[in-house]
Image: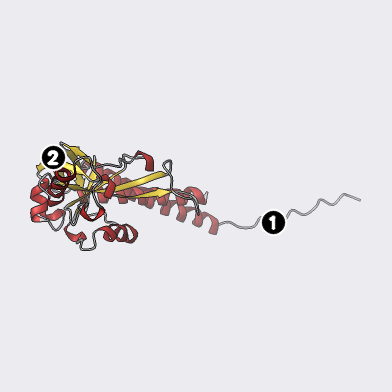
Amino acid sequence: MWRVFIGLLIGGGVMVYFGYTGYRVSQGTSSEPALIELADLEKNMAANAGDLDNPYIRIGKHWGEFPLGIYEWEGRENEQVSAVSKVNHFYYPLTSYNHPYNKEWEKVNAKYGDKKIPDSEVPRLKYFAVLVKTEQYSTVGAIPNEPRERATLDGLVINRIDSLDGDEKALIRSDFPNIDFDKVLILEEGRKPQSVTLSLVLMLGGIGLIIGRVVLGLKIKARGSNKAARPIPQPAIAPT
């Protein structure tokens, strides 16, 4: 019985959490994504999602810098990561066509062509304005190992409710020592705004589960307090 009670509490808490966070991150959004040029974000380096009139956005032409990303993977203790290791989520930066990083690559490729580029001349990405969070790649081996050119990317800016944990920040900072995370937008790929109605249903439903569990627990406790021990029946005495 107590497992059921605990399950109700957990289920109610989860519903309230997703209802609230969904409502918070969807505030100010419209049903259609706002088209934003990545070059403009790189130029202005918006401090957070509050600087956007509509956090539901569509990034225009850009490069997905997959080789510079980080991922969280699942495995047993002491297990080594492999191509089949399960990925929970993957973060990777975006760059615009006009980003200095891509301009440097154009120069280097024009200089060396098919020849090997010396390590000392390989361009280094020094900053970026958008970090994409995605769950599209289920295994490590599925993650692209080269940058990809794309026309658009839709998603929801989630800075209001989500941020990188300490280990993830440390990994990114090892490649980008001067990065200011307060000026980087975290875009969850493919996520859409949550309606106010759904948010309210989740929150009220979760609160209802929690209250119901508390009331049920009190009733059971009250019943238990009114119980009295039955008298032990006396054995019948046979007539003499």
- Neighbours of disc 1 within 10 Å: few (<14), some (14-19), many (20+): few
Q: Nearer the viewer, residue 9 or 123?
A: 123
User: What residue is drawn where x is 15% and y is 56%?
Assistant: 48
The colour mode here is: secondary structure
Is label 2 in contact with label 1 (beta carbons under 8 Å)? no
As drawn, the residue found furthest toward the top would be 151
Question: Residue tagged by mark 2?
Answer: 61
Q: Residue at x 19, y 57 (%)?
A: 126
Locate residue 32, reporting x and y percent: 13, 37
Give the residue at the far bottom of this rendering.
178
Nearer-the-camera pick, 166 or 54: 166
Drawn side of residue 228 relative to residue 94, left or right? right
Left/right of residue 9 with respect to residue 60 in the rendered view? right
Helix or strand or loop: what does disc 2 sit on? loop
Residue hosting label 1: 231
> Which of pointers 2 and 1 lies earlier in the amino acid sequence?
2
Q: Is residue 110 left or right of residue 92?
A: left
Going by the numbered disc 2, the residue's amino acid type is Lys
Cα–Cα gap, marks 2 and 1: 83 Å
Q: Secondary structure at mark 1?
A: loop
Q: Position of residue 198 (x, y in %)?
A: 25, 41
